[in-house]
Image (spheres, rainbow, N blue to C red):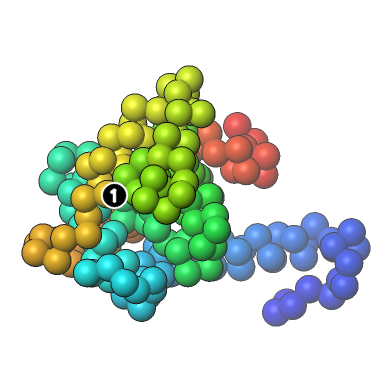
Amino acid sequence: MDKVSFTNMSEGTKEEYEFLDELEDKFKEDLPNKLLKAVADLEHSLSGYQISRLDHVLQSGTRAYEAGESEQMIAAALLHDIGDDLAPYSHSEMAASILRPFVSEEIYWVIKHHGVFQMYYYAHHSGGDRNAREQFKGSPYYDTAVRFCHEYDQNCFDPNYSAKPLSFFEPIIQRVFTQPLADDPEHQARYGA
C-alpha cells in the first residue's frame, strides 16, 4: 500500500492506520533537522537589531550552554524565538508547543511565557506594561522565567559576543528531539502511560 483508500477518517481500517503510523514515525525522525533549518532561517527574520535573529538565538543557546544548563534548556534557548516569522503575535506559544513533548513542564512554561517576561525590559518605552509578568507571580516557575529572560534573552543582542555556530548545537538538538518524554500529554493519550 502506498496510499490509504478512505476519504473520511471514520472509514479507515486498522491496517490503513498502522500503515499511516509507520509513515508518521519515519516523518518524525527528521524533526531535529527541520528544527535546525528553521533556526538557520532566522538569519532572514525581523530586522532593525544590530544582529540577526539567528545570531540572537545562537547567543542565547551559547550562554545557556556556558552556564551549564541542561540540554533541554539549551535547546529551549536556541528555539525560543523560532515562532517569530510565522506567529509574530504569539511566538512564545508557538515555540513552547514545539518544545512541549521534549522538555520539562518548567521549561515549557518558561518558553510559553517568555514574551511577557521579556517585556519587563522594553514595554515602558512603547506604552506597554513592563510589569505584566507580575500576573504570573504565583507560578512555581516565575523565578526561572525571570532568570531565563535576564540571562538568556534580553542580553543576547551583542554584535561583539562570540556565540557558538549552529553546527555546535546539532548533537544537542538531535538528542533532545529524538523521543518525546513519557509524561507528554499527547504521547500519553495516543500510546498510554
Left or right: 97 in relation to 73:
right
Q: Which of 112 and 36 is in front in this view?
A: 112
Q: Nearer the viewer, residue 49 or 24?
A: 49
Query: Amino acid type of disc 1?
Result: Asp
Above/below status of 49 relative to 108: below
Residue located at (85% from left, 62% from top)? 9
Dividing the picture into quarters, in which one does residue 156 lie?
Answer: bottom left
Residue located at (70% from left, 79% from top)? 2
Q: Which of 62 and 24 is in front in this view?
A: 62
Q: Quadrant of the C terminus?
A: top right
Taking the image as drawn, is residue 149 in sight?
Answer: yes
Taking the image as drawn, is residue 33 in sight?
Answer: no
Left or right: 50 in relation to 22:
left
Q: Name the residue under label 1.
A: 153
Image location of residue 161, percent across then percent down: 10, 60
Image location of residue 106, percent across then percent down: 42, 32
Residue located at (55% from left, 58% from top)? 89
Image location of residue 135, percent across then percent down: 51, 29
Left or right: 134 in relation to 57:
right
